[in-house]
């Protein structure tokens, strides 16, 4: 079923119906603002206590990302579902949360997407393989497998760390990244686990939403995320 449209966005393409989970988070708020600027219709999932944090202009859907039934009816057939739910400030001590929140919510979103016959599923995963944060990588890889198993048309983005307000500390690592990219033996790893900015991430997500794959899955790694311009 093709996605419902009723006009054209600021990009000159079709206006999209977009449902966003993780709508009040670091990436979610910035993405929703960008999508609204570009003329898309956005429904944003939020808990009742967080609805005030949804950017103005989006339609708020009160529900729980861990309970797909609480929001499934708000997901339009043929629409785009963007899943951004994740444990804040991930670190190795939060392995249990990666399974109970990150993976569990992704599985619920995939179930909703399949049952509601969405046209495009967009998921923010993580760069892989990686020598650290193995529980986090495992949870995100398991979510990717769930997407593939469901047979969804999907775009999967694999950043490692997204620089932006409140998330600038890895800038001190940039000299190490630059050196790593100069050495043939470490170049591929340095690029795969490189840093992207929030602006690059939002631009890449917006581009993915506006230009979905015809079928199957499209994976955008760090170099591809950096290359997106919108």
Image (cartoon, helix red, strand yellow):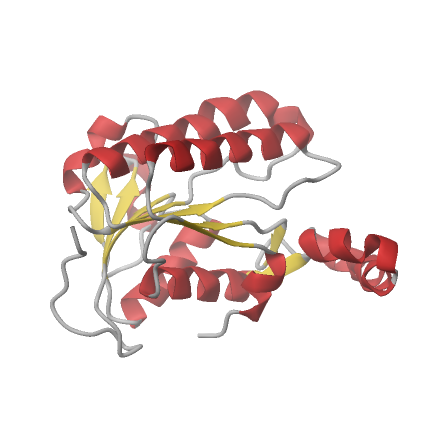
Is 133 displayed left or right of 24 in the figure? right
Residue extending furthest toward the left: 6
Tell me the residue at 22%/51% (across/down): 79
Is 128 displayed left or right of 220 in the figure? right
Tell me the residue at 40%/52% (across/down): 28
Q: Is residue 63 visible?
A: no
Find residue 89 and report its horizontal and vertical position in percent: 59, 39
Is 131 displayed left or right of 72 in the figure? right
Find residue 117 and report its horizontal and vertical position in percent: 20, 41
**How many numbered discs, if any?**
0
Quadrant where the C terminus is found in the figure: bottom left
Is 107 displayed left or right of 199 in the figure? left
| Residue 198 found in image quarter | bottom right
Tell me the residue at 24%/70% (across/down): 39
Find residue 38 and report its horizontal and vertical position in percent: 30, 72
Residue 95 in the image: above or below residue 63: above
Q: Is residue 194 visible?
A: yes
Residue extending furthest toward the front: 215
| Residue 194 found in image quarter | bottom right
Residue 181 in the image: above or below residue 132: below
- Which one is in front, 97 or 207? 207
- Which one is in front, 124 or 151? 151
Find residue 164 and report its horizontal and vertical position in percent: 58, 59
- Which one is in front, 143 or 230? 143
């Amino acid at each position: 079923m093709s996605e419902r449209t009723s006009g054209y966005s600021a990009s000159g393409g079709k206006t999209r119906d977009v449902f966003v989970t993780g709508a009040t988070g670091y990436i979610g708020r910035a993405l929703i603002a960008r999508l609204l600027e570009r003329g898309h219709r956005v429904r944003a999932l939020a808990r009742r206590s967080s609805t005030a944090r949804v950017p103005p202009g989006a339609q708020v859907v009160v529900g729980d990302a861990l309970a797909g039934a609480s929001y499934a009816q708000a997901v339009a057939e043929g629409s785009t579902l963007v899943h951004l739910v994740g444990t804040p400030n991930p670190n190795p001590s939060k392995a249990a949360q990666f399974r109970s929140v990150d993976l569990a919510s992704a599985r619920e979103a995939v179930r909703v997407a399949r049952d509601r016959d969405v046209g495009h599923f967009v998921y923010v995963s993580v760069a892989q393989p990686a020598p650290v944060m193995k529980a986090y990588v495992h949870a995100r890889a398991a979510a990717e497998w769930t997407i593939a198993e469901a047979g969804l048309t999907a775009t999967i983005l694999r950043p490692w760390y997204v620089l932006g307000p409140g998330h600038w500390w890895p800038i001190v690592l940039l000299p190490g990244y630059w050196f790593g990219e100069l050495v043939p033996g470490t170049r591929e790893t340095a690029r795969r686990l490189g840093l992207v900015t929030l602006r690059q991430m939002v631009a890449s997500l917006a581009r993915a939403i506006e230009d979905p794959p015809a079928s199957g899955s499209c994976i955008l790694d760090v170099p591809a995320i950096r290359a997106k311009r919108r």
